Image (cartoon, rainbow, N blue to C red):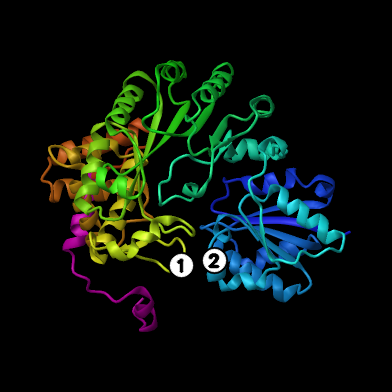
Amino acid sequence: MSTITLATLNAKYPHAAFGLRYLLANMGPLRERTRLLEFTINERPLDVAEAILATNPSIVGLGVYIWNVEPTRQLVELLRRLAPGLTLVVGGPEVSHEIDDQPWLAEVDYVIKGEGELAFAQLCTRLNAGQHPLTRVIDGGLPDLAELELPYALYDDHDLRDRVLYVEASRGCPYRCEFCLSSLDKRVRAFPLPALLAAFDQLIHRGARQFKFVDRTFNLDLERSAAILEFFLARVRPGLFLHFEMVPDRLPDGLRELIAAFPAGSLQFEVGVQTLDDEVGKRISRRQNVARMFDNLAFLRERTGVHLHTDLIIGLPGETADSFGRGLDQLVAADVQEVQVGLLKRLRGTPISRHAEQFGMLFEPRPPYGILQSHAIDFATMQRLRRFAQVWDSFWNRGDLAKGMRLLWSGGSPYERTLAFADWLFATAGRVHSMSLENRARYLAQHLIEIRSEPHDLVCELIEADFVSNNRRAPRLARQLQRAEQAAQAQPTQLPDRQRRHLGHA
């Protein structure tokens, strides 16, 4: 019997396909005939097509996101040529908007936009009955969340052991931040708590320890937030780790007390700051009480063991590099553990594009649709900031060179000092990414000594202490720096090995 095959290309292996599990859980009578296949964007589309066709499918549903749209397009072209009679259905954020602007979608039979849990099952039921919808584009609408079958039982033991478990308590967002797809949501909807908590309880009993909530505003409904936190607090055990996206200025006393009761390291809050420039915030319809936000951050750092992951965006309309830098320095001064720096992306369907002409905003024509330049930040500066973001993430956010980076910032602006380091690193190494920890340590030490004129022994002591505090074997930095200096002074007098061998000089 032919099957219905659900497939997607995950960004990384540890990421489990949450959306596809929802589709599978809601297939009803067709569930036994439905297969779920997961791949990564690093696999060849030809190999993915082979695996999909091996399931003997009559219908293939593909989840399309910003990180996988290009290889998915190639996959669709292959499937259409290899199996012309196959019914191809796509859904997901990347194909829910601006459909007519994506020529490759002409290759598929149906596009489901929006939430597809019920719409996909209904489409498959009709197709199996020989009934073909008259329209290619199907609006999934906003299903009643109480009617959906929860997908959590579909996480198998392998998922629980080796992968990120995505969960959600609500959908939607009341805010209208114009860079975000959630700004298109009409309202916030919540899953019934009893069934949700029962599903979480089953996961914990099966050994699940890490839960990543994808709710945009976990602490919007304070009563529900408290109930979920109380549920997990009663089940605290070694290895429990919970990730929540939080509204930064909404943390009343009742919630504070619950949060403070969790063991250190068991909670991570992703706090979407995005900008600390009031005018820019108003321009993109972002509302936040900055003073209250910093008060909440101070409480979380001083009174709890929460790991704080904050977000800032480069390239918002009218924001300059200096304005962005001041915001970054404010967050560093608040002592948050991570500041995730990202360049603005023009996600399909978001209202951010309405500012493009006025503020001279140009975006990449292909995913991830990153900003290229604006009136406030020219292309050359944007490239510097792109490299800065990579350096910031690998040298600071990872946490393995914290002492060395704090020495770099000593007496100055973390933004300005790190930007100067990124410029130097690019000029010296020719790249700022894909470096081992040992090489990152060596380059940072070299910069601190040669450019910042920090004492050699102090630099080596601090960076080696970073290794020790992270249970890593400390490198012999003094010897490495000496070798690097000798290599820089040496003049290349020999041909490359390959040429020497051909000339008989090997």
Task: Residue 327: say if magenta.
Answer: no
Q: Give the mark, 2 or 1, whose residue is nearer the N terminus.
A: 2
260 left or right, relative to 210: left
Query: Please, which residue is most extreme toward the bottom here?
Result: 503
Q: Position of residue 137 (x, y in %)?
A: 66, 63
Q: Position of residue 23 (x, y in %)?
A: 70, 48
Q: Position of residue 473 (x, y in %)?
A: 36, 37
* 84 up-or-down from 17: above or below: below
Q: Main secondary structure of the magenta part?
A: helix
For residue 161, what is the image quadrant?
top right
Q: Position of residue 54 (x, y in %)?
A: 78, 63
Quarter holding the N terminus is: bottom right
For residue 211, what is the image quadrant?
top right
**SS for callout 2:** helix
The image's mark for residue 254 is none
Marks 1 and 2: in contact by CB < 8 Å?
Answer: yes
